[in-house]
Every structure is written in C-alpha cells, then in structure tokens.
Image: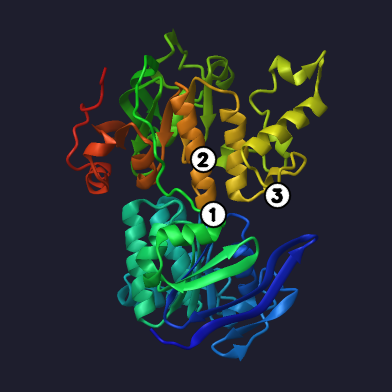
C-alpha cells in the first residue's frame, strides 16, 4: 500500500440553508488503499462524497487529486480526474444490455457500433484482470443485484477511474454476493486502485478496509488504522456514546399462536410460483426470524400477510380466519396486524407527502383522527410530532416532506406509524436496511420491547447478524418454502448460509412445529 495521498481534502465546508452538512473537513486517502468512511445517517458522508464527485460544490475548502489541486465543478470533471462512483441505488437503464449501459454517456462518436465493439474488448480485459465476469449481452432487467453492481463498477473502470467511491455497496446483497464484492475490491486495490467505501456495517469495515474515517454531525472526528481499532470503539466514535452492538434479551416465554399460515401458494404475474405450500406460525411473545437469499418468496410472504397480494391457502389471526383471495390491508389492521414493508420508499411512504400525512396512511379511517365529519389536522400533527419524538426521528418536524429525511429517519417514521399502534402482530421486512449503527440499536430495542409485551413478530431480514441477535426461532426460506428451522443458540452463520443456498435442509422440517 503506497503512502502518498490519491485524495486530500482540506477545510471542506458545505451548507444547505441553515444546515451545515460538512464543517471544515480534512481527510487524506492513501493511493492503493481501501479507506472506509462511516457515520450515522445525516453525519455528512454522502454530502462529502457528492462534493468529491462534483454533484455539489463546496462553500469553502480545497481538493487535491494525486497531489494536484483540482477544481471539480461537475461529475464530468470528476470522471476526467479519474474518479468513479457506484451509487447505493444503481444508475442503470433496465431495458438496455450490460454493454449498452457501459458505453452510455461515453460513446466515441455518432456511430454506436464502434463504441460497442471497443467496450466489448475492454470488458473482456477487465474481466480477466479483476474477475469482473458478466454477460455483456444480458439485459439489466434479467440480472441480479450482485451482477448489476459489477456493471456499475465496470462502468467506472471503462471510464478509466483510478479512484472508486462506493456508497453502501452491500445494502441489497446476500452474504455470498458481499464476499464476492470484497474479493473484487481487494483485487482492485492490489492492482493500484484507490477505494473509498461508505458503509454503516462495522464488520465490513473491519474485514476489508486499511484505514477508516469517522464522521459525526458534519465533522470528521477521527481517522484510524483499521488494525488498531475495534467495532466497539468505532461505534462510540460514530454516535458519541457507548452502543450495544448485540442486544441482550430476556428468556422467551411464548404464549398462544397469534399468526398461523397453512399451505400458502402464490403465483406471480409471470406465472412463477413464489410460495409453494408455505407453512408457519408465530406465538405471542416471540420473534420468528425469516432468513434467506432475496427472491425466495420473502417479499410475496409479507405482501400476502399484510393484505397487499392475493393467495391460496389459510391464514388465521388470533383464532380468526382471514380472506386471502381478496386482499385488504384495512381488514388486517382491524385485526391488530401491522406491516413494515421491505421497501420504505416504494411501499411505506409517499415521498412527496409530509411526515404527518405519512404517519396516518392506512389508519386515516380511525375515529381518533376525526373531529366530527372532518379530519382533525391539528390533532394529527400533534400526535405525529409526539410519535416522532418517541422514535427519535431527526429532525422532529412533522411538517417536512418524507423525502427531506435521511433513509434511517424515513424508516423510523414507518416504524413509528406501525409500532405506535401497539399491534398484536408485527410483520417487519428489512427493518434496518441502510440504517446507521445508532438507529439500528434503537430499532432493535423497540422490537424487543414489543416482543416482551407479548406481541408476535415476524422478522424478515437479509442481515444474518440481525436474525441471530433478535430471533427466538429462525426459519430459512428457499425456493418458496421453509427449508429448515433452527434455534439461534444451536446454529451459526455457516449453517444458515448453507440452508439459504438450499443445502442440508429439509423442506418438510419446520413446516408444522406446534
């Protein structure tokens, strides 16, 4: 690892109105290294990287690339300076091929054929050099999340990037895909590339980075060698206090079955059977964790149970049968079922609407929201502000649009709406996706409080750490069924990972554990 800086920022500041997102930040990133940047949601990480990539212009400060003072006025200037960025939400055209996405915006002239031929040859070289193998003729819509991320990296390398910025790169990846990504990043580093990794996952920081910088409330509070720190120290630097990385929970005393599902079958719009005679039950006072690689039926399961999708089979809530052929979320809510969807922005919020409006969606028919025949808007806003205070939503201003909040605080708005109703059954999908360490601790604590109050929680998560930490029972989904069930204290991530890959399980196991 070379010891001269590929990037150096000196005294960088950026404000948006009265909000100072970055305050006098200086950072040095060594060439040929992997440098992590961590911090809570809203700490200023993305703003800083957006300045480096030319999306924002700093109010003050200087940028040096390979020792040379550089003005980065826009993203084209950043690309010219050898900087590439892989965004958390990929910038790909779904109905274009891999090859077409690679050359998009980097064509050599009016005729596309020579550019495509050149890109094909370059991709072959990059695949051989870095292990970035991908079918150049595949449509983006036909490839998985891990392959799409490779395409984003290839786009940057095709534009001759020597510095790669990756923003939360493993947010939607399986453990196996994340491991493959890290092997690729290590290979890129060994070939002399410089990597900046923005993530909230401390295990990733410890496993892959050479150095790590910690941001808090718009300032840079520390930069340390990764081998000389620990997850506990980094968490404390991020939040400004000690953080529990693994929640302590009381012994479980499950009560009666509150949610019972038998022989659930779902066929999607393309005629693919997503749930194949699926069975589960959840008791009062327990968390049933559902582990599995994305795309094995978890999304369809939550949609059916939450009343968003029709299905065949039986569903019983607290002894009452539920109609599955004609879905309806309002009926479920009336029976004490709350649903935190997997995708907060697409299914949990309307981003243009204000927080107080989002916090009554699905519950706007409740009599408590009305004053006579009209909605009690002042009362709704007051209750929303109170709930936002209890769930530590920042800023605690119910008049702001949902899009004005960071991802972690958007998640807290959804959780405040659903958990604040004191449901008997909580369906929760990916509760901490894209959420920082402090908010993760907060969300986990609230879930355990609900469980200790005798509620039944069905937790779907791709984070095995989260599944192991919170669950009282773990069921692994594969190809539309439960392939195996384990107790957290009698398994490990390796065994669960094998089950997630369809190895070593028994689809009948766990089907009916009464």
Above or below, 219 relative to 162: above
- Vertical position of residue 88 compared to residue 185: above or below: above
Question: Marks 3 and 1: CB-CB under 8 Å?
Answer: no
Locate residue 389: give its quadrant. top right
> Residue placed farthest to the top in the image?
320
Where is 326 relative to 351, above or below?
above
Q: Nearer the viewer, mark 2 or mark 1?
A: 1
The quadrant the C terminus occupies is: top left
Q: Secondary structure at mark 1?
A: loop
470 or 233: nearer the eye?
A: 233
Residue drawn at (55%, 68%), measured in percent from left and top? 104
At a point 51% along the width and 23% down the height, the residue shown is 307
In the picture, the quarter occupied by the N terminus is: bottom left
Left or right of 473 on screen, residue 137: right
Mark sitting earlier along the chain (3/1): 1
Measuring 40% from the left and 23% from the top, which residue is drawn there?
285
Q: CA distance from mark 3 to mark 1?
A: 26 Å
Dot 1: few (<14), some (14–19), or many (≥20) neighbours within 10 Å?
A: few
Q: Which residue bears the numbered disc 1?
A: 241
Question: What mark, if any, has residue 399 been given in the picture?
Answer: none
Is residue 399 in sight in this rendering?
yes
* Distance between the alpha carbons at the discs numbered 2 and 1: 17 Å
Q: Is residue 74 left or right of residue 294?
A: right
> Percent position (x, y) of residue 507?
22, 30
Q: Which residue is mark 2?
A: 443
Residue 501 at x, y = what percent? 25, 45
């Amino acid at each position: 690892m070379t010891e001269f800086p590929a990037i150096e920022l000196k005294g960088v500041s950026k404000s948006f109105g009265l909000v100072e997102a970055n305050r006098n930040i200086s950072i040095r990133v060594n060439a040929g290294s992997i440098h992590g940047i961590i911090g809570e949601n809203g700490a200023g990480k993305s703003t800083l990287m957006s300045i480096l990539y030319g999306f924002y212009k700093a109010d003050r400060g200087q940028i040096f690339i390979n020792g040379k003072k550089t003005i980065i006025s826009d993203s084209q200037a950043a690309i010219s300076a050898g900087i590439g960025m892989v965004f958390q939400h990929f910038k790909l055209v779904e109905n274009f091929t891999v090859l077409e996405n690679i050359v998009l915006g980097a064509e050599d002239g009016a005729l596309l054929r020579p550019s495509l031929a050149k890109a094909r040859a370059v991709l072959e070289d990059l695949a051989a050099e870095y292990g970035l193998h991908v079918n150049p003729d595949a449509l983006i819509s036909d490839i998985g999340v891990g392959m799409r991320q490779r395409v984003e990296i290839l786009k940057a390398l095709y534009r001759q990037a020597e510095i790669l910025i990756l923003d939360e790169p493993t947010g939607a990846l399986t453990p196996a895909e994340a491991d493959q990504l890290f092997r690729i990043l290590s290979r890129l580093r060994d070939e002399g590339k410089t990597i900046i990794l923005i993530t909230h996952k401390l295990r990733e920081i410890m496993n892959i980075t050479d150095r790590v910088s910690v941001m808090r409330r718009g300032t840079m509070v520390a930069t340390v060698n990764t081998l000389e720190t620990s997850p506990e120290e980094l968490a404390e630097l991020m939040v400004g206090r000690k953080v529990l990385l693994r929640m302590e929970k009381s012994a479980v005393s499950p009560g009666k079955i509150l949610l019972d599902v038998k022989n659930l079958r779902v066929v999607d719009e393309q005629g693919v059977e997503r749930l194949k005679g699926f069975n589960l039950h959840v008791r009062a006072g327990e968390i049933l964790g559902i582990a599995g690689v994305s795309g094995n039926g978890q999304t369809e399961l939550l949609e059916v149970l939450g009343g968003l999708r029709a299905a065949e089979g039986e569903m019983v809530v607290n002894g009452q049968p539920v109609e599955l052929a004609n879905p309806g979320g309002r009926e479920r809510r009336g029976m004490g079922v709350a649903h935190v969807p997997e995708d907060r922005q697409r299914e949990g919020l309307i981003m243009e609407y204000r927080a107080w409006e989002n916090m009554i969606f699905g519950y706007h028919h409740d009599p408590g929201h009305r004053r006579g025949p009209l909605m009690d808007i002042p009362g709704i806003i007051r209750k929303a502000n109170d709930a936002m205070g209890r769930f530590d939503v920042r800023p605690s201003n119910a008049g702001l649009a949902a899009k004005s909040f960071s991802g972690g605080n958007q998640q807290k708005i959804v959780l405040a709406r659903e958990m604040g109703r004191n449901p008997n059954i909580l369906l929760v999908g990916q509760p901490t996706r894209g959420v920082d360490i402090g908010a993760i601790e907060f969300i986990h604590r609230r879930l355990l409080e609900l469980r200790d109050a005798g509620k039944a929680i069905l937790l779907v998560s791709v984070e095995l750490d989260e599944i192991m930490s919170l669950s009282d029972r773990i069921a692994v989904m594969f190809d539309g069924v439960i392939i195996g069930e384990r107790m957290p204290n009698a398994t490990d991530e390796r065994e669960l990972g094998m089950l997630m890959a369809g190895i070593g399980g028994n689809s009948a196991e766990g089907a009916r554990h009464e």
